Amino acid sequence: MSDPAAILLIEDDEDIAASLVALLTGEGHAVSWKASGRAGLDAARAHPPDLVLLDLGLPDMDGVQVCRELRQSRRPPVVVMLTARAQEMDVVLGLDAGADDYLTKPFRLSELLARVRAHLRRHAVVDVPSRVRSGRLVVDVRARRAWCAEQELVLRPKELDLLALLVAEAGNAVTRERIMSEVWDENWFGSTRTLDQHVLWLRQKLATAGLKDAIVTLRGVGYRLEPS
């Protein structure tokens, strides 16, 4: 990216925060740090970030609630949760609250940097045309906006990227491998559970907008968007 990415770190552990601020600043990002959930939300409203690194164990409020409030902004940032909660249900709750990704503590700094680079890259550039259409669905990738029958959809960053790819390939099967490569990262090495969760969210939002059963699961292959 030509301009520094704005990264907001919400983490109450000073030692961890100092290490991450130094690491990310060294990568050329503009990093701000807040030690509580409320301070982090205030900072995000005052200066909207491109990406938020969010600890779940905050002193004043649960990180899941912070994530939900971040998602209410007009252009929600990419949210990567940092959590010591390794149980599957905790991960699902985090994703369901709107997180784009999660890392379980202790994590490798090299993995954190790889995830940050991947999310920022995919948030800025998606490997489909700028504006794609299929029937009632329209996605404008550069404007980061999507519509269903002229009703604007409120989508998370990865939901928009995923929908753009499916709309561009409407009627065709899109493999899980291709989706993970193009929407997440070609070197992605995390769980693909986040893909399933994002498909679930998209289905719910499309159904609310009047487009039910638009995304078909192709077992053992991936997904297909039915032309509307």
Image (tube, rainbow, N blue to C red):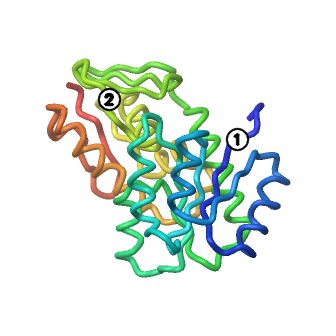
Q: Which quadrant of the rendered structure holds the C terminus? A: top left
Height in image: 149 above or below 32? above
Q: Earlier in the sequence, mark 1 or mark 2?
A: 1
Q: Quadrant of residue 188?
A: bottom right
| Mark 2, secondary structure of its residue | loop
Q: Name the residue under label 1.
A: 5
Residue drawn at the location 71% of the way across and 68% of the way down: 17
Three-letter amino acid code of the residue under disc 1: Ala
In this rendering, position of residue 56 left or right of residue 10: left
In this rendering, position of residue 177 left or right of residue 206: right
Q: Position of residue 222 (x, y in %)?
A: 35, 50
Height in image: 125 above or below 186? above
Q: Mark 1 packing: few (<14 Cα in 10 Å), some, or many (20+)?
A: some
* Separation (CA) of disc 1 from disc 2: 32 Å
| Mark 1, secondary structure of its residue | loop
Residue placed most toward the observer, 78 or 161 = 78
Residue drawn at the location 38% of the way across and 44% of the way down: 72
Height in image: 162 above or below 217? above
Q: Name the residue under label 2.
A: 170
Q: Mark 2 packing: few (<14 Cα in 10 Å), some, or many (20+)?
A: many
Three-letter amino acid code of the residue under disc 2: Ala
Residue drawn at the location 81% of the way across and 51% of the way down: 27
Q: Which quadrant of the rendered structure holds the N terminus? A: top right
